[in-house]
Every structure is written in C-alpha cells, then in structure tokens.
Amino acid sequence: MRTEILASGFGGQGVVRLGQILGEAAVKQGYRVTMLKSHGTEMRGGYVRSQVVISDEPIDSPIVENADLFIALSLAAYNAFKHLVDSGVILYDPAFVVEIDETLRCTQIAVPAKDLAVENLGKAVFANTVMLGVTARMVEVLDRDVVLQSIMHVIPKYQEENKRAFETGYSFIDGN
Amino acid sequence: MKRYLETGNFAITEGAILAGCRFFAGYPITPATELAESMSYRLPQVDGIYIQGEDECAALHLCIGAALGGYKAMTATSGPGYILYADPYGWAIGCEIPLVILNSGRVGPVSGITGAPGQGEFYLTRYPTQGGNFETIVLAPNSAQEAMAITVEAFYLAERFRTPVTILADQLITDGFEDISVPENEEEMKEMGFRTWPRKINKGPEFYPPTDEIDIPPVVLGHNTGALCSDWTPTEEGYDIEEVAAHHKHAYRLIYKIRNNRNLFSNLYEKTFLDDDPDLIVVSYGTPSRVVNTAVKKARERGLKVGALRLINLWPFPDEHFQKSTRYLSVELNWDGQLVREVQRAVPKDAEVHFLGSCGDLPTVQDLIETFEKLLKGQSLSRRGWELEGW
C-alpha cells in the first residue's frame, strides 16, 4: 500500500502545515511516512509544495510521481503539477485556480475552501482546515478522528473554529 | 522508543544529544536553521551550551574552543556557510580536535536556491581547508532516521580519530518530515546499533606520536598536560616548529590514522541487487539513492539486470566497491558531475561510467528507468543539463 498526496500553493496558505498534519495523523495510525517540503523564496516567483507519502512498508522514494490526491491552491501550482495525477483526484480551490484543464483524464473537484471558510467561520484563514476535512474524507487510509486530533495538536489555537472548519470540509463531498 | 513525524534537523539534534554533544555554536542558514533552533531549546535541558556565532567561521572556532575545554561539540550549516569553515576546519584537523559538522546541501553556487536540495560539496568535504596533507571523514545519510544514527556515529568516529567529521546531508533530509523513532535509554540505543565513545582526556604524551594510532585521547586544556594548539607544525614534544621532518611525521599521522583504520566505518554502504553481476550498477548517496532504490526494484521487475550501490561513507572514498568491470551510472544532485569523477578513477580501465544529474529536484523513478533502459541497450545519454535545448 502506498498513498501519495501532493499539496501546492503560495507561501502563507499553510501548504507545509497541511502536509505536516496529514503526515502526523498517518504516523499516529502506525504508518511509515515521508513529507518533503520545498519552498523557494516565494516573493521571487516560486511555489510551496508538500509531498506526502504514506505506506505500510519502509518508503524508498519519497517523491510523488503518481498522486492519489493533489490539492492545488494556486493556478501556478495547478499547472506545474497537474500532470502528476493520472487515476487520482485533484482538489482545487476555484478562488485561486481560476481555470482548469478540461483535457485531464483524472477526477477534478472544485472545493471553494476559501469561500466556505469565510461563509461559515468569517475568516479565510480557516480555508486550509476546510481542505483538510475534505482530504480526510477522500483519502482512504486516513482516519477522520486522528486527522482532527493532529490538527488540534499542530494548531493549538482556535480549536473550536478549526473543528467546525474541518467538519465543513468533511461533509462537503457528501453534500455535493 | 518514541515515534514522531519530525524533520531530519530534529533527528540530528536528538542523535547529537544521545552521543553526548553538549555544545553547539552555529549561524542560521536554510536548511540548517531549525537544527540551531532545536539545539538552542534542547541543549539547556541537558546542561549543554548553545551559542550563536557572529558568522560560520566564528561558530566553528567556538566549537574548537569548546572541544579543547572537554566538550563534544557540533556545528551545522549549508554550502554557503561550509566554505567559511575553511580556516577553523584546518585548525581542527591539524590540532586533532574532535568535532562534528553538518552540511545540509542546497543548490549552489553561492546562495543559489535555499529551500531545494543539491549535492555540490562532494569534493569540498574532501578538501574543506587548504594545504593538503590530510584525510577527512565524511558520512552521508539518506533519511531522517539514518541521519540520527549517522550523527551518533560521527561523534564516535570524531573521538576515536581525533578529527572533525562532516555529515553531508541535503535539504530534503534536514528539512523534510519523516516518521522517526528516538531511543529513550542506552538499551534502546544499542538495539538500534548506536555506538558511543566517551570524551577521554590526554594525560600524555605531550602531543601525538608519528604513527597511525587512533584512540589516543584528545588534548583538553587545564589537565596538566602539554596542550599544543597551534597553526604551525607540531612536534612530538608539544612544541610548534617550521621544519620539514616534523611536518612529515605530522602529515603521516593525519593521513594514515584515517587510511589505515578505515575498517572502523567502511561497513557504511548499502548494496541492492548486486549479487548476480548486474549489467549496470547505479551509484548514489543521500536522498537521490532512495529514488534509485525504487527505480532499481521496478527495473528488476521488468527484467533489467540493474543493481544499486549507495555510499554512506564518502571519504576516504571506498574504492573497494568498484572492482567489477561493468557499466556504472552515477546519479547526483548537480549538473557538473562530481561523484562520477571519483567513480571513473576507481573503476577498472575497461568499465563504462555514465552520469545523470539534476539539481533542486530529485530525478523521478520514470527518468531513472528510462535511463537504465537506454544504457542497457548501449545507447548514449543525452547530457541533460549541458544542453539547454528542449528545456
């Protein structure tokens, strides 16, 4: 079993934090995990990327080459990595990914995480947690409660709001 | 044993503390800043000392001072800081002072790209200072967990050989997160194969004899022994001198204490599918080796007779692994080809040696398998990176 999750966007969107939370949840569930982060100097045109690999065996290659899930949080990130998804799923926030590539064979799901965060919690900053909720629902190996625990551990502030944001995301797929 | 999702920087910090490191001086630089940060937090908890130097040169000089005061000391940086060690590194080699140095490779030259991996200091770690007449010990882990083990080992070797040991990692190891198990007591350390060596104090001879002997404890100031710490050539009697015969003895010791006792760490390598005389041996170290391992396993499933040799002990270079006359491919995180030159030197005359470079990003499994296929068909590789066409 090997599950590959890629998240990418601007600096400050919480891309690294997101990968860390998913990785920590998987460690708590007893899996082997790698989470690579790369960050150029974002002001000079780079993007931030987390590559999470979850496996029940020791992990050799830590890179995501065939993503089961790609979370795209900027148009530049979407265009840079969309080709890494074949049979997997792309989750994108239409507030940032304003144009998608209709020629791709994979499933693409628009998750208006920023709008949902503003609507339900009054602040865009919770968009990341909304996306984590959707991710916990989409990725089979991840346990919902353990992901929520990891959010609470990694982000000790605003626990009530983060819980609600997580629930919003978790129920999003089923409601649409 | 405690399990975490943590960075290589965290793992190295814990490894250092398990090995008895109680002094760290450094200067912040991505991707080694978090190591300085975690040392600043962890060392005071174990009665250790953390100092931020005014620059990297000062930081390593501070470590030398601490080591001469009886501490196991460490510093950490990336390529742009490692070059600033040139002066104190030479002092530490010449005065035979045990130290551990982490170089977390990013993309160069100069500041290059901060948050991406590179392997541009393969030769720099062999010659981190001027003057020659010495060997260096350099170890390269390929995961956060192994980085912890290699840190413990680096302290062990530094003490026994009385010399600085460089850990050559890359940004993906130090900055990347991974599941890590940290031993909580000596028994668990032993279970994980960690070995440690206590700081002993030289009570004589005045300096060191002109032999390849290791395990003569290093000089610690304030213990009524000769405590030569000079940048000139030392004599056995503990004086410094500018004289050819004395220098010859000193150089012999610096070179042969390491060359003749390499067996202490020459077991640090990993061989995958090398038992059946493969038609291609892929050589690598650090994070690229993990992608190589996946690629080689997949290539075997497709019937390609490929094997992988991963070097952990980089210097002194382990020539003994390159006896077979076959095809070799060196996979590195640089465009100029560094490890490949050493492979070319070490292989038999009729062996074929190829190079696949990339920088800032790992090669993919797919890239590697395509490369293996080409080489096994006898096709030449387009020299990626040396031709801008098609980029």
Image (spheres, coloured by chain):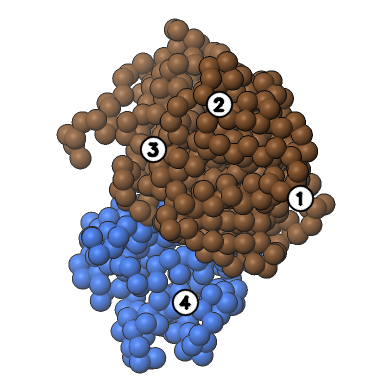
Label 3: how many Cα within 10 Å (few below 14, some 14–19, many 20+): many
Local secondary structure at mark 1: helix
Judging by the rendered image, the residue that carries numbered circle 4 is: A133
Tell me the amino acid under the disc marked 1: Met
Q: Earlier in the sequence, mark 2 or mark 3?
A: 3
Residue A7 in sight here:
yes
B94 to A169, vertically: above or below: above
Cβ–Cβ below 8 Å for labels 2 and 3? no
Label 2: how many Cα within 10 Å (few below 14, some 14–19, many 20+): some
Q: Calculate the distance from the C-alpha at mark 4 to the C-alpha at mark 3.
A: 41 Å
Cβ–Cβ below 8 Å for labels 1 and 4? no
Local secondary structure at mark 4: helix
User: Could you tell me which chain the residue with mark 1 belongs to?
Assistant: B
How far across and down, in percent of the image, does residue B386 sit?
Answer: 24, 30
Judging by the rendered image, the residue that carries numbered circle 2 is: B241
User: Could you tell me which chain the residue with mark 2 belongs to?
Assistant: B
Chain B colour is brown
Q: Calculate the distance from the C-alpha at mark 2 to the C-alpha at mark 3.
A: 36 Å
How far across and down, in percent of the image, does residue B197 sit?
Answer: 75, 43
Judging by the rendered image, the residue that carries numbered circle 1 is: B189
Q: Calculate the distance from the C-alpha at mark 3 to the C-alpha at mark 1.
A: 33 Å
